[in-house]
Amino acid sequence: MALQGPLDCIEVHPEHVFRSVYNSPFESSPDFTEGWWSDIPYSYGSTGGIEFLSFRITGVEVARAQILLDKLPGSDYGVPRLASKYVELSFLEVAARCQRQGLGIGTRAVQCVVDRYPSVGLLAYSEEADGFWDSLGWRKFVHPRGMPSYRPLYVWVPES
């Protein structure tokens, strides 16, 4: 894979169509899971509590993220109050052509998110990516019921 260089983090905005209807801020691409990026939640327009990030190397999109602002960790996970404020990395996807290529795109994208929110805690519910989140050293919390529908919660907090 010829993609080399710095990873740029660009905030992208959905296009307002009508009332609470928005078009995706991302272009359709076979490299990404369409259902994750095509349906924009109603709350985007009413609260502004969502950010969408596009990660690019030399202008080529290599990852995407959806960030939910002002979140709290699920109390049923038993997470102690580690930070006064959190944001949730609700979706993170590396382009299919860049996955498992040794480029570190996912790790670099998460570091960009950490750098973007240096004074708040970060949350991520793992969707079959526990190995990835474990490799980052984030604290893992498993729901006490242990049911498959409860995804593991990973938490990162800034150093004091």
Image: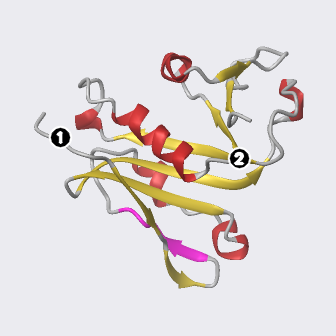
Q: Position of residue 48 (x, y in %)?
A: 67, 70
Q: Residue furthest left?
A: 2
The first of marks 2 and 1 along the sequence is: 1
Question: Helix, strand or loop at disc 2?
Answer: loop
Q: Position of residue 146 (x, y in %)?
A: 77, 14
Which amino acid type corresponds to the residue marked 1 in the rendered image? Answer: Gln
Q: Residue furthest front?
A: 160
**79 or 127, which is in the foreground?**
79
Who's the residue at 46% across and 55% down the image? 37
Is 77 on the left-hand or right-hand side of 9? right
Alpha-carbon distance for marks 2 and 1? 30 Å
Q: Residue furthest bottom?
A: 18
Is 69 on the left-hand or right-hand side of 72? left
**157 or 61, which is in the foreground?**
157
Question: Helix, strand or loop at disc 1?
Answer: loop
**34 or 66, which is in the foreground?**
66
Who's the residue at 82% across and 35% down the image? 74
- Does the stretch in magenta take in 24? yes
**Residue bearing mark 2:** 120
Q: Which image quadrant is residue 49 in?
A: bottom right
Which amino acid type corresponds to the residue marked 2 in the rendered image? Answer: Val
Q: Is residue 25 above or below residue 135?
A: below
Q: Is residue 29 above or below residue 139?
A: below
Is 22 on the left-hand or right-hand side of 31? right
Q: Which image quadrant is residue 59 in?
A: bottom left
**Residue bearing mark 1:** 4
Q: Decide: marks 2, 1 in contact (CB < 8 A)?
A: no
Task: Look at the image and give the residue range highlighted in magenta.
Answer: 21-26
Q: Position of residue 20 (x, y in %)?
A: 64, 77
Callout 2: 10 Å neighbours few (<14), some, many (20+)?
some
Q: Is residue 129 above or below residue 67?
A: above
Position of the N terminus by quadrant: top left
